[in-house]
Amino acid sequence: MKRYTSPLTIYIVWHPKFTHGEKVAENIYTNFNRDVENPLSRGIGIPVLFRSTPLKNQKVPKEIDLNASDYNAILVLVDDYLFNDDDWNIFVKDLVEKTKSDDKNRIFPVAFSENAYYFEEATLGKTQFLNAKTKGGEHTEDELNKAIEGIKQRMLHGLCRLLMGKKPTHKASEEIGIPAPIKLFISHAKKDGEKEAEAFRNYIESYTKLNTFFDANDIADGYAFDKQIRSSISEGKAALVVFHTDVYSSREWCQIEILTAKRYMAPIVVVHHINKGEKRSFPYLGNVPTIKYNNDNFSEIIDLTLYQVLVNLYHTRNLEKIASLYRSEDILTMHLSSPPELFNFLDILKAKEENGATEKSLIVLYPDPPLGIEEIAVLDGMNGDIHFLTPIQLSTYF
């Protein structure tokens, strides 16, 4: 029987006396696994494991098994308690030693103390640390929340790079001359969205370090988008940010951009910037995350886009692994990295035909949690031989 291993696991390491460690850990869990306050909400579902409580009769936590997942990301919160505890020093330095020359494991150190920069100085360079310390050493609630947001942004960027086989962020300069791993297409209508699209592109190039991650291109009406995005998406290397303005849905090329991105299952984020309204909304702008445009929220748009890139990367790998465990001669399986919609039937029926399985039942896997009864009823009504299931439902099917 095949053995399942997660494509990625996140570990959070902190000293048990560090009072803010639990709040940081819960926020990371909520962001990358599922909301701790609403466990049935839609989340990425990446396993997030804590290493803070020492094992019985020991002074440090359980050792991290780096072979239990394809990739491992280890967030280390370095405060004065950890820095001054010899046993914890050995525990963390052993992790650093095991991961320093491994492209499948990555340390994300966070400095909650000035002393953090002297911790394992020969291995963890200062530029590798995320600075979360304050002048007085103590964090107000606002300062801690700001630090947590910085950690999540760093993790988003870093986890995407890890799953794409890119170097850590602090070593990105070593990749000079290598194209950015993701083409970010900024889709807009020239008549009323050009200013915002250009400002967004300029923000990425001028105020972020994402030029080593995004190759940002703004798309105007009539741009030969389909040729570029098809070649990029076929390699899983494209994302689309839509500036949804009043005339956007009425533009043929904007419609082509959306349909092409959906056909190739690229990550899509829609930025709502409707002023007066639309005569007809474009029906295929749905089933994707949205965010309201507020003039100065480019950072939030970038975070949501990175989040969708990570969702796509993780679920593509994870669902393929799960599907392989249940494949049989009688049932065909395929997977979607986002919840299914009627648009997907074009590719689902094509896949059945290409596999010579028009008479076979087909299971289409999509990420948990399951869609509501009403949505599933619409999908099931299209074809009784096609079953839409999440991993949690799959075991009950067989």
Image: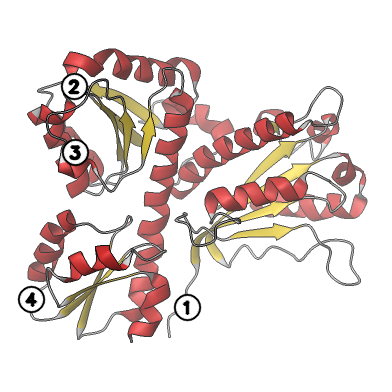
Q: Mark 4 or mark 1, which has the lower sequence index? A: 1
> What crowding class fits label 3: few (fewer than 14 Cα within 10 Å), some (14-19), or many (20 or more)?
many
Q: CA distance from mark 3 to mark 1?
A: 38 Å
Vertical position of residue 395 compared to residue 76: above or below? below
- Looking at the rendered structure, which numbered label has been put on residue 3? 1
Vertical position of residue 208 compared to residue 99: above or below? above
Q: CA distance from mark 4 to mark 2?
A: 40 Å
The type of residue carrying mark 4 is: Thr
Q: Which residue is mark 4?
A: 358
Q: Mark 3 or mark 4, which has the lower sequence index? A: 3
Q: CA distance from mark 2 to mark 3?
A: 12 Å
**Residue 350, percent from left and from top:** 9, 63
The answer to whether the residue labelled 3 contacts the one labelled 4, judged by CB atoms less than 8 Å apart, is no
Dot 2 lies on which element?
Answer: loop
Dot 4 lies on which element?
Answer: loop
Q: Mark 3 or mark 1, which has the lower sequence index? A: 1
Q: Nearer the viewer, residue 82 or 260?
A: 260
Q: Which residue is mark 2?
A: 189
Which mark is nearer the camera, 2 or 1?
A: 2
Q: Nearer the viewer, residue 189 or 79?
A: 189
Q: CA distance from mark 2 to mark 1?
A: 49 Å
Q: How is the image coloured?
A: secondary structure
Q: CA distance from mark 3 to mark 4?
A: 28 Å
The answer to whether the residue labelled 3 contacts the one labelled 1, judged by CB atoms less than 8 Å apart, is no
- Looking at the rendered structure, which numbered label has been put on residue 361? none
Which mark is nearer the camera, 4 or 1?
A: 4
